[in-house]
Image (spheres, rainbow, N blue to C red):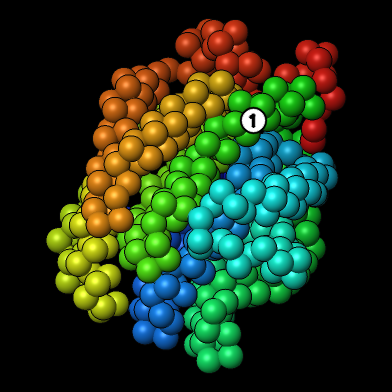
Amino acid sequence: MTDPQLIAVRRQEAPASAPGWLRRELSNPLFRNAYALVANGGLTGLLGLAYWALGAKLYAPDDMGRNWAVIQAIMFVGSVTMLNFLLIRFIPQTARHTRALVLVCYGTGAVAAALLAAGFLLTLDRWGESFQHLDHWRAGLWFVAMAVAWNLWNQQEGVFTGLRHAGWVPIVNVAFGVTKLVLLVALASAYPGDGVTLSWFVPASVMLIPVSVFVFGRLIPAHRRANFGRGARPTHRDVAKYVGGAYVGGAFQYASISLIPVVVAAHISSTTNAYFQMAWALGMMLDLLALTLSLSLTVEGSFDQERLAESARAALRRTLTLMTPVVVLVVVAAPFGLRFFGHEYADRGAPLLQILALAVLPKALIELYIGVLRVENRTRLIALLQAVRFAGVLAMVLIVVQPDRLATIGLAIVGVNTLVAATVLPGLLRATRSNRSGPAGGSGPAANRSDRSGPSDRPGPSPAAGGRVIS
């Protein structure tokens, strides 16, 4: 790509009325996408606080705990089967076949979610009291439908991010959050036993239709026009090689977020689970902030691999700058803030939330390194890191889980993530200093990684290198 083309791609200017520093920040797609995702995390976090507060006031703790156990199970099934990693990695390098890539990911994810949901329902006797009400064909059918809807809903975020239109993510999620709040209140009297779950997944299912029309009718055609003929394209072989390790890594990542609370729910009562899930949900909102720059780094690194080291340095600085004060604020404010939900929520949930907040910083370093690995197609290492992290957390949680000492779960998570972060930190620092050659070059550390990590680090070999080019 020529210098003028690079400048045209990278300078999608912020409004002229914005201050100079803000224009400079937003003219960089890495930060523009990242800040959009950070805004999404902040806005959805505020709506989540309001949602939890109303839920704690309107629903009994045992109903809250049971509903949230089901929600986490649906999230696990829907998330572990989605293919966001593929969308975020390869949409930036496709043009003509972007629509086909998205549809294949949607269809594959939806079928996998339905099958996994059915498998979960067949093993209900192993999951404890919080899930036994699903042992009816009608409730089971709803469970499967909601898992499929959640899969597609989350894959939409991957599409927005891969298209470099992450600014739409907070807009869509705010609309979802507001609708969810309204339904939470409206369903409290008519459906006190299932209102929380319905308020979560009914709006996601309904909103899929207009959002999909917008994505397929406007954003994908615009992406095709803007990127047709730009740079090298990935081949089918590149995508196939990337899928295996990347999917395994993504599955373990989402299992760390959604399967862990399902396992905890199987070992504690529904009432205790309400206190645990409150702290867990708020802690996962912080994790979302940690993920944002990693996802944006993957997108921008895929667009321009020559600037990966520069983007990694910038992402690391922004991560530490943004996350450190947020962590300190949560640690200090958690005991006071959770009293708004009720004394039991504060007394039993605040210590866990404080520890989960501390875990965000090592998690952020791990996610940034994984963002670098995604760009370099080192999917085997991604899978290994995510597997080690998940297995370590799961093993420790099963050992330490105690209904009257929920904070021990947080200590297990902090310990495992700190060890993994210490292991990957040297590699992350090397990535911020490395001098990468361009796609046409053959030297440098990136050029020698294909034997360890699957496909070449270059964005896409020519058709002669094997495989049909996806353009």
Q: Is residue 185 left or right of residue 310?
A: right
User: Which of the two residues, 121 or 351, is positioned nearer the viewer here?
Assistant: 121
**Where's residue 240, x and y in %?**
74, 26
User: Which of the two residues, 332 or 232, is positioned nearer the viewer here?
Assistant: 332
**Where's residue 97, x and y in %?**
81, 42
Which secondary structure, mark 1? loop
**Where's residue 57, x and y in %?**
36, 84
| Residue 436 in view, yes or no | yes
| Residue 372 in view, yes or no | no
In the rendered image, the quadrant that contains the C terminus is top right
Q: Residue at x 66, y 27 (%)?
A: 244
Outermost residue to the left: 332
Going by the numbered disc 1, the residue's amino acid type is: Met
Q: Residue at x 24, y 72 (%)?
A: 344
The residue carrying mark 1 is: 1
User: Which of the two residues, 28 or 52, is positioned nearer the viewer here?
Assistant: 52
Outermost residue to the front: 125
Q: Residue at x 44, y 31 (%)?
A: 391
User: Which of the two residues, 142 or 270, is positioned nearer the viewer here?
Assistant: 270
Residue 359 occupies quadrant: top left
**Where's residue 203, x and y in %?**
63, 75
Q: Is residue 452 above or below residue 26?
A: above
Q: Is residue 333 left or right of residue 398?
A: left
Q: Is residue 140 above or below residue 107?
A: below
In the rendered image, the quadrant that contains the N terminus is top right
